[in-house]
Amino acid sequence: MSLPAAGYPRLLALGDAAFTVEFGDGIVPETHARVLGFAAALDTLVADGRLPGVIERVPTFRSVTVYFDPERAASGVLGETLLALAGEGRRATASGRLWTLPVCFDDDLAPDLADVAARAGLTREAVIALLTATEFSVYMLGFLPGFPYLGGLPAVLEMPRLATPRSRVPAGSVAIAGRMCAVYPWHSPGGWRLVGRTGARLFDTTQAARPALLAPGDRVRWQAVGREALGE
Amino acid sequence: MSQAALEIVSGGIGVSIQDAGRTGYRSIGVPVSGALDPLLLAAANGLVGNAPAVAGLELRLVATALKAVGGPLRVALAGDVSTRLLAASGEGRAVAAWSSVTLVDGDVLQIGRPRGTAYLAVAGGIRTPKMLGSRSTYARAGLGLLLAPGERLPCAVFTGDVHRDWRAAGPLHHASGPIRVMPGPQLDHFGAAAREAFFGADFVVTPAHDRMGLRLAGPPLQHLEGGADIVSDGVTPGAIQVPADGQPIVLLADCQTVGGYPKIATVIRADLPRLAHVEAGDVLRFCCVDATAAAAARRALSRGLADWLAALQPAGTLDAASLLSANLAGAAVRGDET
């Protein structure tokens, strides 16, 4: 087992009703395993009623933000408890679900695919082969409800966001930026490069128990499909 | 319970349904939303006998006209706003904020453009369907109802004493002075000059402000070497992000759940409601407090609201004895049972 990054974990106040527990400052699997391990341990304590006043927590690439009701939790005591729990160094043991999601790479649904291929010095088909051969892991959800940040993009496809973001990215767009892949669950402005379109419904408000399809720790594989399979 | 409705006649942009917001879904990227000023929502609700966080209308930026359909309906406005009631009978009269008014079928409320943010509460609450535990509108993900002219908001028929409205002793005032913040979480991304500027300079509210956040203009807050970007982490309403241009952004209720800019400080809970009322050109200053002072400020705020609510009285009376014997909560339907 590798050691935690030097100086971590550490506790930061995010105002008077939240703490951020940091496990590192970069996007690395070891840090994220600690993030998920801490979040799971925290969930157990909350479920057991041992952390009154804790409302919810948001795991990210490198930290967990814990939101609390300051009238029900003494912030000093809660902060000490969180830091002690973080110091136990738990790592996520179980990997999440493995999803195989459909993606269509037709040109009109993948407006940046040709440019991505040119920048990477690859053919369009080679980019598709790379994307569909990769097992991505869900680092976190954010930006928009259900928007997953998927780690694991092959280094050859690493490239910056568009210099000028689009004012409207269609819902279901599969996109890449930096070393990440993502899906836009909603129409939205956005600067990521669009390389395909999925028909998978990433956010469904009628599923109150699990409105977001993906959860941090899940894994995703892309399966190329024809546009008729998108159900549009 | 029989149903009535409030119909949006005009307005819509800047008008939203808000309650206490959504909790429990931030980890999947759903903003908390909820009233920008929960205190004023509580005040409006108090005037119609509702529990503090029952869903009401948040009014910003534009004038709004609402028509009572069915009824009677009891409503109240809290905020810096002027309103006229155009009765179904054809008469018009001014309606004061900070008091309740009972509408009958066909009555139209013409609500002026509020200064900052105002709230309209309806006895029994607005009864649109809850989505993920809240009625709050969050347009970007289709959560809650998006309001447009013609939309009818289901409400309860008012079953209390229609002849006895309620009024407050006066407006509910917020604290004044600098906005109180707790430092961090990324204060260490800024050097002494930036810190001094942040805690001393004037910051002007720009026109780029909405329910997601307020962009401010002031002396550029320079990051230390390489400090302008962080790997995204959790944010919260009140967090003050400083992007590479050094101009701070104060996040508000509809803010995203994560962000990649360093946060120099975070506005304390007790002062967040004040930010609901700033407008372009207003000047803000920030001062640093600790968790103990933040807790004292929260206590002062809830005491202020409790005192204000305790001083509500039947309209047209100044008699202390009838005030004491009045049972405010019994006079109206409660809106917290759904």
Image: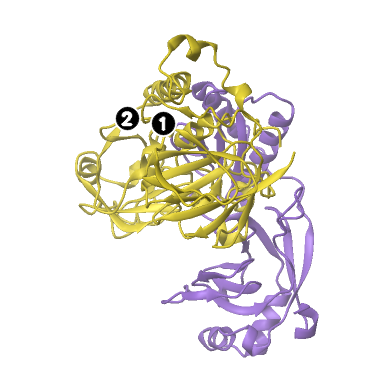
Chain A representation colour? purple
Task: Give, as a three-letter code, the residue at label 2.
Answer: Ala
Q: Earlier in the sequence, mark 1 or mark 2?
A: 2
Q: Quadrant of residue A105?
A: bottom right
Label 1–label 2 contact, CB within 8 A: yes
Camera-nearest residue between B67 and B289: B67
> Residue B175 got which mark?
2
Q: Quadrant of residue B140?
A: bottom right
| Number of residues whose C-alpha sits closer than 10 Å to that of mark 1, classed few (under 14), some (14–19) or many (20 or more) | many
* Quadrant of residue B225 within the rendered picture: bottom left
In the rendered structure, find residue B4 and report the number of the disc placed on it: none
- What chain letter is assigned to the residue under label 2? B
* Colour given to chain B in the rendered image: yellow
Chain to which the residue tagged by mark 1 belongs: B
Give the color scheme: rainbow, by chain, secondary structure or one colour: by chain
B177 up-or-down from B213: above or below: above
Residue nearest the observer in this picture, A153 or B35:
B35
Disc 1, SS: helix
Disc marking residue B270? 1
Does the image show residue B160? Answer: yes
Which of these two is toward me, B93 or B179?
B93
Q: Nearer the viewer, mark 1 or mark 2?
A: 2
Please state, as top left, top right, bottom left or bottom right, where the C terminus of chain B lies in the image.
top right
Farthest residue, direction top:
B321
